Image (cartoon, rainbow, N blue to C red):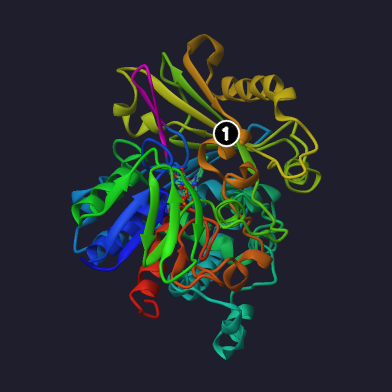
Amino acid sequence: MGAKVTIVGAGVGGLAAAARLAHDGYDVEVLERLPECGGRNHLLEVSGFKFDMGPSFVLMPDFFEEVFSYCGQSLKDYLDLRPIDPSYKIFFPDGDIFTVYRNSEHTKEEMERIEKGSAKGFDAFIRETSRIYGMIRPLLYKSVTYSSLFNPYYWGLVGRIHAFQSYWQLARKYFKSEKLCYAFTFEAMFMGVSPYQAPAFYSIISYTDHAQKIFHPMGGMYKIPLALEKLALKFGARIFYNCPVEKISKPGRKILVKHAKGVSEADYAVVNADYAYSQADLLKRRIPKYKYSCSTYLVYLGLKDKLKNLAHHNLFFSTDLDRNLRQIFDEKTVPQDPSFYAHIPTVTDPSLAPDGKEILYLLVPVPNLLNAKDSFCRHEEAINKLVFEKINKVCPCRLEDIVETRNCFYPEDFVSRYNVKYGATFGLAHNLAQSAFFRPANTDPRIKNLYYAGASTQPGGGLPVVIASSRIVADLINGKKAL
Ligand SMILES: Cc1cc2nc3c(=O)[nH]c(=O)nc-3n(C[C@H](O)[C@H](O)[C@H](O)COP(=O)(O)OP(=O)(O)OC[C@H]3O[C@@H](n4cnc5c(N)ncnc54)[C@H](O)[C@@H]3O)c2cc1C
C-alpha cells in the first residue's frame, strides 16, 4: 500500500482528488460529514421529482474527460453528457427575448434583431475571448504563488488577458446595447461576482458557453459526483460518510485528522471543505478579510404540468440590472426586483420527473451573510410573487395552480449543510485580488503535505475548474510540476 492520503470532504473536488490519488497507488480515505457525496452538487428527491440542488450548467466538458482519462477510463462509460439546444433564453424586462442557440449563426440573427451590426461584434468578441482562453487554459492546471510574480512570463500575460479591465468593460468594447452587454456578462453571476468587478479574463466562461456549448448529464447533475465516487471506489479509495472532521494538526511527522470516528494519521491530507471554513474551524487560524461571493435563494418546484415557451436554462433580468447588482454586492440588501435563473432540466431529461410533470428550479442571487444589512425572510414572499408573475407572463400559465411540491434552500443552509462560510454560494469571490496568484494556493503555507482542492482555492469555482484543482493537488503530491 502506498502512502496514506486523508481527504476532508466528498464534494466534486474531494472525489476527483480521491480517484486520481487512488489510481496512483495511494491509500486514500475520504471523510465526509454528510450521509452522501456531492457537496454543493447535491440531489433532492421528492415524490418522484429529482431536483439537482446546485450546479446545472456543464461547461468545458474536456475538463470532465480529463479526470477519467487520468485514471485510464473513458468518461462515456460513466456519464452520458448531451449538448443542449437552445443553450438558453434570456428574458428582458421589456418583453424582448434573446435565444442563444448551439448554432452561433442563429444566435447572431437574434443579436441583429436587438442591435444592428452586433453579429460582427459577436465574432470579434469570440475571437478575443478565444485568445484569452488559449492563454488561461494551461494556467488552470497550475498552482501559482506570489513567487510566480517574479517570472517575467506572467508580466506580459497580465496585459494580454486584460487583468485590469472588468468583464463588463470588455463586453462594452464589442456591443453597444446594454442588453447584449448583460447577455455576454451574466455568467459572472454564476461565479457569485458582479460583471463590474470580475476581471475581463473571466469572459472565458462566455467563450466556452458560446463556442464549446452547454451540456447536460442524462439522469441529472448528481450523476457527476456519483461517477467520480464510482471512479474513486474502483481504484480502492475508502469513503466514510457521516464522518465530520473536527480538527487538522501536525504535531510530528504525520498529519492528524481528528474526526467523529477517531483520529486518522496521514502522510498527506487534502482539504476539500470550504477553504475559509477549514482555515477558521479546522486549523483554528485567523482568516484574512476575504471577499466572498454572493449567496443564493433557491426554490425547487415539482409541477403537475409542463411549462410552455421556456428552455432548459432561462434567465430573467431585473428591470434595473445596475441597481440589482449594487444591492447584492455593494449595499448588501435583498433586491426588490432581482434577476433570477429558471432551470427546467425536464425539457431535456423527462426522467427527472414523473410522467408528464416538470421540474422548475429557481435561483435568485442575494447578498451573502457577512455584515448582511437585511434579513432575507422579510422579502421572501414578495420575491416569490414577483418571480411567479414574470414566469406566468411568458408561459403563459398560473404557476401557483400547478405546484405539486415546493422546497427551498436559504443562504443560512449553505452554512449549516455544507459549512460554506457566510453562505457564500460560490465560495471566495472571483475579483482580481482573489484570482490567480492571489487566490489561496493549493498548498498550505505552514503545514507540509497539506493541500487544498475546491472552489475557494486555485484555480477557482465551478465544476470544471474544481476538477482541475484536484489535478493540481495530485501533481503536487506526486512531485510533478503541473501539466
Ligand atoms: C446553487 C449553485 C449553482 C451552481 N451552478 C453551477 C453551474 O451551473 N456550473 C458549474 O460548473 N458550477 C456551478 N456551481 C458551483 C459548483 O457547484 C461548485 O464550485 C462545486 O460544486 C464546489 O465543489 P467543491 O468540491 O469545491 O466543494 P463542496 O461541494 O462544498 O464540497 C465540500 C464537501 O466538504 C464537506 N465538508 C465540509 N466540512 C466538513 C467537515 N468538517 N468534515 C467532513 N466533510 C466536510 C461538505 O459536506 C461537502 O460535501 C454552482 C453552485 C451552487 C451552489
The magenta segment is 42-51
- Spot occupied by residue 352 in the image (x, y as percentages of width and height): 33, 28
Q: Quadrant of the C terminus?
A: bottom left
Q: Is residue 330 left or right of residue 341?
A: right
- Spot occupied by residue 89 in the image (x, y as percentages of width and height): 51, 39
- Whether residue 256 appears in magenta in the rendering, the answer is no
Is residue 132 positioned above or below 180 on the image?
below
Of 221 and 1, which appears nearest the observer?
Answer: 1
Considering every residue shown, the one lying at the far bottom of the view is 152
- Spot occupied by residue 391 in the image (x, y as percentages of width and height): 57, 24
Q: Is residue 282 visible?
A: yes
* Residue that appears at 54% across and 16% down: 399
Q: Quadrant of the N terminus?
A: bottom left
Residue position marked by numbered label 1 in the rendering: 413
Q: Secondary structure at mark 1?
A: helix
- Whether residue 45 appears in magenta in the rendering, the answer is yes
Of 357 and 281, which appears nearest the observer?
Answer: 281
- Spot occupied by residue 175 in the image (x, y as percentages of width and height): 65, 58
